Amino acid sequence: MNRNSTNIIERWYKTILGLALMASSGLLVGCEFGARPPGPDRAVLTSAATSERWQFGDVEGQKLSTPHYAIYTTSGERDLITRLPEFMESTYAHYCRLSGLPPERDAKPMSIYVLANRQQWAAMTEQITGPAAPTYLKIQNGGYSYNGICVLWDLKSDATFGIAAHEGMHQFLHHRMKDALPAWAEEGVCTLFESCRMVKGRSVFKPTDNPIRSNDLHRLFGSSAWIPLEKLLGGDAGDFLGEQSNAYYSQLWALALYIQSEPRYRAGFETMLRLASQDELHTALGLSSQADATRSLVHVIALPAFERYIDRNMRPFERNYREYCRKVSGEVQPKKPWYVNSGR
């Protein structure tokens, strides 16, 4: 499967994701920073970044360059400007660690646009997504990743960092994967970057502490909204719109956590990503290199990939996974969502 084929799948998949984001506030990612404190009088960049003038239409902005990122921003928030470059470089290291893939030393920096407000973001979205813009413009908070480019707007709170981390993982996978991943794998792993904090300028992620996902998961027990494992694995965002999207993403979050918590499952997951990065995953699953790059391909590879690299024994896995979900959701009084004290 070549890169162009993967791009076709991604464009379709991100269109569906945009609709899901519009349909459910539960898909808006969060971050454990709280309200952004006042910045210094002058933005002093980390030593890992350089700054140069950039202009978006009539709006003055900056291009912040780091080894792996080119961050274009019109935001005047000094705290965002000073922290985001180092945050993304630190987060990139987390992406590599979790995926098992080595850092790319000489690759072209990945582009991230952080606009000052939604109006500027909408104008940039029309430029970048073209005919797909009407779908993306329905997103009400944060941003998206499209064809390997992240486009966000500053929410004026540190929730912006959590959204950048989630969408940045989509971006990372776009650039590193030559074969498309199953939806359960990509969306699940991206949710692991929603809960983060800064410690001495470095991003620290605690994936288990994600109140939105754990609250949604907690509400599933004892209800008819629980999605059976085989249906969860075989579907994608387009199959779970409206209220079902909360269940879909909270269960994928728990699934990704469970896989990462078990060494043999994590090893299988890393093998799957390594093969996809080498253009060998679909061949290993018995697909022709000429397989059509359609939505059906994402469905076709979903269960075979899980059975080959995670666990062939679905019934006992589902039993253990459901028990893990009970633990990670707390089965206690749900916590307050992250955005209560985040300035939203």
Image (cartoon, helix red, strand yellow):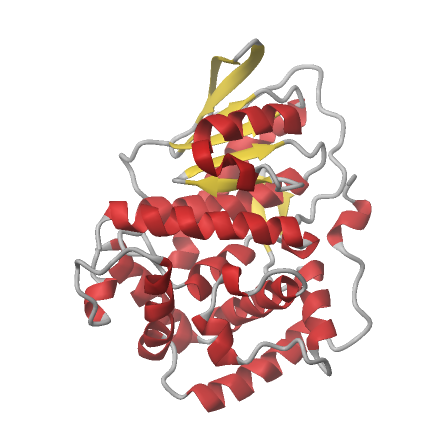
Residue that protrudes farthest toward the bottom in the picture: 316
- Residue 139 % position (x, y): 62, 42
Closer to the camera, 180 or 169? 180
Quarter of the image for residue 70 reads top left
Residue 206 appears in view: yes
As displayed, is residue 99 above or below residue 53?
below
The residue under the point 52% across, 60% down is 237
| The C terminus, quarter of image | top right
- Residue 47 % position (x, y): 48, 25
Quarter of the image for residue 335 reads bottom right
As displayed, is residue 15 above or below residue 286?
above
- Residue 67 % position (x, y): 38, 31
- Residue 254 % position (x, y): 57, 70
Relative to 58, is 292 on the left or the right? Answer: left
Quarter of the image for residue 267 reads bottom left
As displayed, is residue 270 above or below residue 72?
below
As displayed, is residue 60 above or below residue 131?
above
The residue under the point 24% across, 71% down is 285
| The N terminus, quarter of image | bottom left
Closer to the camera, 240 or 44? 240
Residue that protrudes farthest toward the top in the picture: 58
Relative to 336, is 138 on the left or the right? Answer: left
Closer to the camera, 151 or 14? 14
Relative to 152, is 271 on the left or the right? Answer: left
The residue under the point 59% across, 79% down is 324
Residue 94 appears in view: no
Closer to the camera, 50 or 257? 257
